[in-house]
Amino acid sequence: MANTTTAQAEYENEPETDNEPDIMELLRADAARSERDSGVSDAPEDNLVPFIYILQSNSPQAQKKHEAYLEGAEPGSIWLRNASIPIISGDEGLIFQPCHFFKNYVEFVPRDSGGGFQGAYTELPDDTVVETMDNNQKKWIRPTNGTELIEYRYHAGLVHLDNQRLPYIIPFKSTGHTVSKNWMSALRKPFPDGSGRSRSYHSKYLLTTVHRTNKKGQWFQFKIEDRGWIDRPADLAMAYNFQQLLLSGQRQADMPLLEHHDEEE
């Protein structure tokens, strides 16, 4: 067997001919050989869908002297985690095609106790206790281990960037629930001729960020505007396929970032 150096040299010096077959035909034929390893994992844990975050004043990614700082980021920027161009201006926004909705309760250790993600549940654990805070908001805690739970609402869909369609999930918590619920109402969109109700992924929306304040502080949250029906058959097919992958469990949400749990929304 040739060593690596020899094999590489043989590959690099392979002669070209005038009768080379079409490379795409070769690739398709090779992909059809089902007995071969494609080099890609189909396991759900290897196909996680990243989150979209709005960067706040205390987000490490928006602090220029922090090691996690991202070029061009500032409070109010939209962060597409793991994207080649991760920062989108909150003023300009992005086009999002919603495909699926779900919610859960995220358990975490409070920051003043060391912090730490503990898990996510579709229902509150049996030992959960509800506390009412001074502002009449409810807080879920587990006295047995000192953790807290936050209710999240998630909108999964495709981000439209030029000709790319990137799968992402937008998490909403706290005051963001109002934004999510209002969006949910808008998604119940009838067809213009009254022939029935459309599906969420039949339309696209512009997501920008706006500044908000209350007695607890200030923050940025999404502003969502209808941008009409999708206009490419490919977008319909991609959205349907993405929805089915989520429903079947073949695609799952990535683990949330801890530093974004206790940011005000």
Image: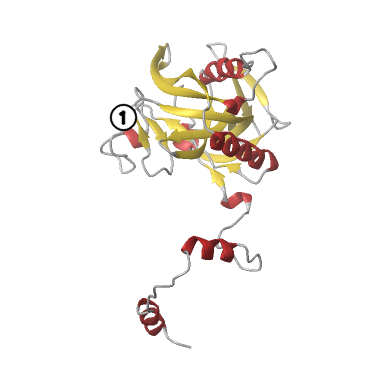
The picture places residue 226, in percent across and down from the top left corner, at 50, 18
Residue at image coords 62%, 68%: 36
Front residue (pair 50, 213): 50
Q: Viewer-proximal residue, 221 or 5?
A: 5
Residue 109 visible in the displayed image: no
Q: Position of residue 71 (x, y in %)?
A: 28, 39
Residue 47 relative to residue 75: left or right: right
Answer few, some or many: residues within 10 Å of disc 1's Cα (few below 14, many 20 plus, some between 14 and 19): many
Residue furthest bottom as drawn: 1
In this picture the colour scheme is secondary structure
Residue at figure coordinates x 61%, y 25% from the top left: 200
Q: Looking at this view, name the residue that lies furthest to the front.
A: 18
Going by the picture, which residue comes out furthest to the left?
65
Residue 137 location (% of width, % of height): 57, 15
Q: Position of residue 207 (x, y in %)?
A: 44, 23
Q: From the viewer's perspective, is residue 125 above or below residue 11?
A: above
Q: In the rendered view, would you say 119 is above or below 180?
A: below
**Can residue 37 be seen in the rendering of this structure?**
yes
Viewer-proximal residue among 160 and 234:
234
- In percent of the image, x 53 and y 29: which residue is there? 97
SS at circle 1: loop
Mark 1, residue position: 74
Q: How many marks?
A: 1
Left or right? Give the position of 53 relative to 251.
left
- Dividing the picture into quadrants, the one containing residue 198 is top right
Is residue 195 or residue 110 the one in the foreground? 195
Q: Which amino acid does the dot numbered 1 rest on? A: Glu
Left or right for 263, reference 169: left
